[in-house]
Image (cartoon, rainbow, N blue to C red):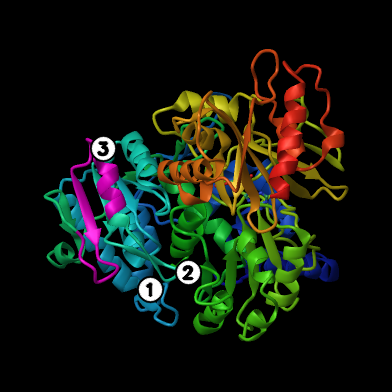
Amino acid sequence: MWLRCGCPSRSVSTSLRVLASPLRVLGLRRCNTAAFMPESAGFGGVSGRSGLQEFSVSSSESFWAAVARHRLSWIRPFTAVQDCDLSRGRIRWFEGGKLNVSVNCLDRHVHTCPDRVALIWERDEKGTEVRYTYRELLEMTCRVGNLLRRHGVKKGDCVTIYMPACPLAVASMLACARIGATHNVVFAGFSAEALADRIRDAQSSTVITVNQGVRGGKILELKKTVDIAVQSCPTVQQVFVAMRTDNPVAMTARDIAIEEEMLKEDVVCEPATMNSEDTLFLLYTSGSTGKPKGLVHTQAGYLLYAAFTHRYVFNYHDGDVFGCMADIGWITGHSYAVYGPLANGGTTVLFESTPIYPDPGRYWDMVERLQINQFYGAPTAIRLLLRFGNEWVNKYDRSSLKTLGSVGEPINTEAWEWYYRVVGEERCPVVDTWWQTETGGICIAPKPSDPDAEIVPGMAMRPFFGIKPVLMDTEGKVISGNDTSGALCLAQPWPGMARTIHNDHQRFIETYCQPYPGYFFTGDGAYRSVEGYYQITGRLDDVINVSGHRIGTAEIEDAVNQCPAVAESAVIGYSHDIKGQGVFAFVVLKKNVDVEEADLSRQLNDIVSEKIAKHACPDFIQFVQRLPKTRSGKIMRRVLRKVVELDLDSLGDLSTLDDPAAVQEIIQGHRELLSK
Ligand code: AMP
């Protein structure tokens, strides 16, 4: 689908006539740049990757206009490239334009290559993968689209999808896009309560799920979880149920067997004409308060950015097989298992299993079997696998691999080196990609870069096209110069960014736009090296990252505090060898509570897993008499972090504490906990 490399012959011959030899070199560079990015032919002599990056930032409108015209199929062209004002949280791209996202992801490829494989479903049961061509995926999408329409789902309605990674989940997302509904995919590891919160906040009337999930050989009772969730969701009128296993589940009057009903539907479904800025999906993520926020992504800008980053960060080419290991319930699954690859007419792998099922060779067996060219995984999985030794990797042929990607959390040097040397045999660039649910797609990554440009282990390094990172000091001023750290902000809007928080634009403004007026605040800190490369240093707010899953410590505290025996709690993240960060909870019990600590720990874990998800459960619970607080009652988490990190020499100034003796008690209790 991309334009072939081609120098406009007139400019070359003109150049050669004027000054043959130097301009022949220039002509060659132009040709390479145009081959690399066909749109650049219209950028007035811009050449090389760094030239393109500078142009994309300094002439952002021209850049994105050309890219959007070239890479998306429009029903009606846009009339304005952007209308953004970060200080007011107003973000609009490609207004006046009309398009349909599912047509961009399916129909246009069905016209040119209907039998190309769109999805490879790598099922939990190794060696039972199923392939779906673009034609088959379009038909499945149309049937689901027609079914949803027949059951009253209209443009603008929200459909919640609670499913594991599977073709029907992708078809459901695309079916929503086709008929103009909004989808709200909830990670199928979330509990009934967490699911219900998200359904209610999104005001969904329709849920799509499966009877049971299968992961790592274990059965997950997803339909039962939905049954519990919808009891507290009065808006839900219908639940579509697909059969992942042969085990029947109890069906109520509200439930509809989706596969049976789909068979009655036509394989043609009229796509809705959508405005660029209509909502495409909501995706809930954690913030620093207890309530998760439903970030809103819209049609054209999101799709363009997902496709463009997929093409350039991973150097994806026609015919490649792209293997993104993330679940569709996270933004990585949305952008790089579904929308990016499909918009590019690619072949994408949907991974249903775990890295160690049935054994720690699962990923590399899959690379060999499916001939994966780009592998995109999480540091937590890499760290886990490196412990099992190189033989699990070396057993399999990985010569198909061209690029290795890392996402979701910082990748430590040891894991990076192992990924690069053992998995990639020092042949494949490792791209450590920094981005977030809010950014829609990758913003900082080592690639694209000039061919021989260096890649530094464990650094995201270079801003993507159209991205202008800045570091801010504590007074809110832009820090200039290199070899410096600060709060990471993005200085100008880009098409993939979230537009708002569902039903709470004020929170969007307060969280992202007000901390540094005129800039988008990411919530992360970063270091800019002597060479000007970026390295993410971690969250600046009370959000922790467990195995690449973002969780607000306040969310866990809210759950823990619901235990009748608990008076109050403080949750912090600590450095964990495999998960990146683990969860440490300090808990104060109510007076006269007489329960064994071990029983109480179990109870608290059950509560967190019931209210949020298993991955949010504390790794350690320390019961304390009181928490270290300032005189105004604010918990001094900094002190708790130092205790857990065993960095007692850096406890800092304790004079502002209400009762400094509390710290000594906690240190003593922590020693006892570790010695158990
Ligand atoms: P999420 O929105 O759930 O994808 O989480 C985004 C957060 O994950 C970011 O704000 C970072 O704190 C962290 N993160 C994502 N990618 C990276 C990376 N490559 N290096 C360091 N931290 C990362």
Could you say whether the residue bearing mark 2 is in a helix, strand or loop? Answer: loop
Disc 1 marks a residue whose amino acid type is Thr
Could you say whether the residue bearing mark 3 is in a helix, strand or loop? Answer: loop
Q: Compared with residue 193, is residue 654 higher up or lower down, i.e. above or below?
A: above
Report x, y in % for residue 140. 26, 66
Residue 11 visible in the displayed image: no
- Left/right of residue 114 with respect to residue 448 in the rendered view: left
Disc 3 marks a residue whose amino acid type is Cys
Q: Residue at x 44, y 57 (%)?
A: 328
Name the residue beneath numbered marker 3: 233
Q: Residue at x 80, y 69 (%)?
A: 25
Residue 425 included in the magenta stretch of the image = no
Say whether disc 1 or disc 2 marks the residue closer to the N-terminus: 2
Mark 1 vs mark 2, CA separation in Å: 9 Å
Report x, y in % for residue 172. 30, 57
Residues at badges 1 and 3 in contact (C-beta under 8 Å)?
no
- Residue 199's image quarter? top left
Name the residue beneath numbered marker 2: 1
Depth check: give the residue in front, 562 or 451: 562
Q: Compared with residue 441, is residue 25 higher up or lower down, i.e. above or below?
A: below
- Left/right of residue 157 with respect to residue 408 in the rendered view: left
- Left/right of residue 594 with respect to residue 484 in the rendered view: left
The magenta segment:
224-249
